Structure formats: C-alpha cells, structure tokens
Amino acid sequence: MTPTIAQEGGVPTILVVDDAPESIEPIVQCLHKGDYRTRIANTGERALALARALPRPDLILLDVMMPGMDGYAVCERLKSDPDTRDIPVIFLTVRNDECDEQRGFDVGAVDYIAKPISPPIVLTRIRTHLTMRHAANFLRDRNAYLEREVDRRTREVGVIQDATIMAMASLAETRDAETGNHIRRTQKYVHALAEQLRGHPRFGPLLSDENIHLIYKSAPLHDIGKVGIPDRILLKPGKLTADEFEIIKRHPRLGHDAIVSAERMLGLSVTFLRFAKEIAGCHHEQWDGSGYPDGLKGNEIPISARLMAIADVYDALISERVYKKAFSHESAVELIRSGRGTQFDPDVTDAFLALADTFREIARRYADPQADLDSQRERLRLVFGEV
C-alpha cells in the first residue's frame, strides 16, 4: 500500500469534502488548531481525484448530501479502489436517522459526525480513528513481516534438508561404483512413476503433492547403507561369492538403521525421513516375498520402496559399469516387464511400461560422462589392481 503523509513521518492530512463553503470553513479552522493539514474538495469527483493523489490523505471527512455524486457513492468508490480502500472515512451529516447511519456503515464509513460540528468532538474522533488506523497498519505490517520470516525460514529448512540429503547421498556415492548421475536419474524416475500413479485408487491417498515431493527428496538416500560395506566387496569387479552377496544384502538394513539413529538423536520423527527409511530399507524387497532384507511381500512393501525398486533396477540395467556392459533400453524394459507380479508390483510395472519413453529420455538427459566411468576404473584399479 502507498504510504500516507503521516506514515512517512509528516503531519497527518485530512481531506474535507463538502459542497457548502460555509460548512468547510469551520471544519478547516478546527483542523488547523489540531495541527492537521487539509485538502478541500467540493464535489464527489474532485474528492476521488484528491484521494488518489500521492501522498494519500490519512483520513477523509465526507459530507453525505452533495449534488451529483453523494457521499454514499463517493465512499463506495473509495472502498472499491485498492489505492484508497484503507483510508478511514467519517461522514458529515445533518441527518440522524438510524437507517442513514446504517447505510453509511454498510458502504464503508467508520464513523458519523453531526453538523453543525463541535470542534472538540471532531478532533477527538479524528485522533481516535488515526490511532486505530496506525494500529491496524502496524499489525498488518507486522503480520506481513512474520509471514515473510516464516516463508524465509521454511525455505531455509528445505534447503538444509536438501543439502543434508545430498551430502549423505554423496557420501554413499564415494563408496560405490555408481555415479552421481545415478542419483539424479533414479530421483527423476521415481518422481515420474509417482505422478503417473497419483490418480490410481491403490496409490492416490498416499501420493499427494507433498508426499510426492518428499519421496522425490528422499530417493537419493536409497543406497546410503552401502557406506557400511567393505570396499573389497562393494567395488568387486567380478561376480560375488555367496558369502559376499550376503554381506551386500546388509546395506538396506544399514541404511534404514542409520536414518532411525539420526531421528533418535533429533528426538523427533521427521516426515521426509519416513520415506527415506522406507526407500533405504525396502527397495530390494520383491513383490513375491523373495527379496531382502526382510522378505516383505506384496502390499507389505511401502509404496515409496516399490517405486524405487523399478527405478533402481532400470538404471542398473541401462548403465555401463567397468564390470559390465549396458543393456539397451528395450532389453531393460522387457526384463522389467518379465518381473511383473514376481519382482515388481504389477500396477507400478504397468506405470513404468506406460512411461518407458520418459525413462529413456531421463536416461539420455542425465547420461554418465565418460570421465565418471574413467574415475570408476581408476578406483577399482587402486583397490584390486588391473580390472
């Protein structure tokens, strides 16, 4: 709102609107004794023009009975204009009928002063309403400040959450043979699947805007548990032994427990970490119960983890690693199709199949740079020698 003279630290200005000079003179004399500045208008049209002029008047004394546009019409116009609607209007009138007063309040007036005026009453009423306006402005500005502060702090908390997630995910990435773009791709895949399924009767109640956003934010933590797996197993370029695979299978539990431990230290349950726990702990569970670490089956597996399961498998299939060649997109799609109802939730699989072209585009857009693959080879060489 454009400030008034009083808000800028000056003397308050009162706009006096009356078509009769003999009525205006005593009002102006009264106001000058009260150290107010005045503007004068003798028609409704002139009053509207002066009310809009900068700086705005702090208060308007408005005669009801005027030829042409009367006071009620002027007040309605003032209150319908965003630039003038907050200026207090006090009606000046010789009328004292309750219906007239009610009409004035209905169109937005804050008070009535009877004519002929009593200077002490005029000055008291003006001081009262200017004080009330100052208080209302203070509260409005204070509320606006608090809203901005809440918004700023909310964004700050969101940034801290995002930074924490990416830092933890990057920590896992430094231990793994995956690349940074694996995190970005799987995030995008999960988000696409969630959006595809949000209207499905099985998934709609959970996949609200907020929950989809939180699942998207939490997805990078799916392999955080790999920080607890020894390099000789995690980075092994060849086939794992049965014992080594049993150790690898510990990483979902390690990831889940790490997040639970973080929550315990915070002393509260954090919503976005709920999905992080589900994804980290359950993304290797399988629809038919043959997955790990807990052998969960069907709807026992959290929805967020069912989304991540397909995202993670698809990306593993189409990605080149130093110990394997990349599958083609078409081959990866067929392999996932073949796991419908056994490895993967049938409805999530159908959503994936409907989004196959979207997955292909995400994979293309966030493809691994050759430098990342070269870095993998160097890390493996340092751990195992030539690979």
Image (cartoon, rainbow, N blue to C red):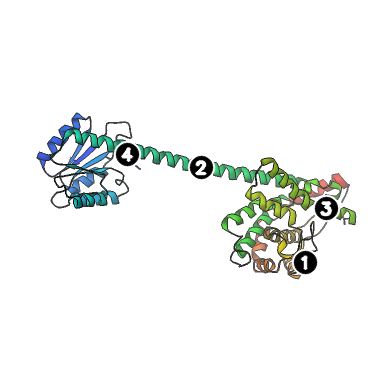
Query: Separation of disc 4 and disc 1 at Cα?
Result: 68 Å
Question: Which mark sits nearer the N-terminus, 3 or 1?
Answer: 3
The answer to whether 56 is drawn above or below residue 214 in the figure is above
The answer to whether 355 is drawn above or below residue 121 in the figure is below
Question: Which mark sits nearer the N-terminus, 3 or 2?
Answer: 2
**Residue closer to the observer: 48 or 144:** 144
* Residue at (86, 54) in percent of width and height: 246
**From the image, which quarter does the N terminus lie in?**
top left
Q: Are marks 4 and 2 in contact (CB under 8 Å)?
A: no
* Residue at (36, 40) in percent of width and height: 136
**Disc 3 vs disc 1: which is toward the camera?**
1
The x, y position of residue 66, in whole percent, is: 14, 49
Q: Given the image, on which type of amino acid does mark 3 rest?
A: Ile
**Residue closer to the observer: 159 or 153:** 153
Image disc number at residue 164: none
Query: Separation of disc 3 and disc 2 at Cα?
Result: 44 Å
Q: Are marks 4 and 3 in contact (CB under 8 Å)?
A: no
The x, y position of residue 111, in whole percent, is: 24, 43
In the picture of the structure, the residue carrying the numbered disc 3 is 248
Image disc number at residue 150: 2
Q: Are marks 3 and 1 in contact (CB under 8 Å)?
A: no
State the SS at label 3. Answer: helix
Query: Separation of disc 2 and disc 1 at Cα?
Result: 46 Å
**Disc 4 vs disc 2: which is toward the camera?**
4
Q: Given the image, on which type of amino acid does mark 1 rest?
A: Asp
Decide if residue 68 is in sight here: yes
Question: Crowding near pointer 2: few (<14 within 10 Å), some, many (20+)?
Answer: few
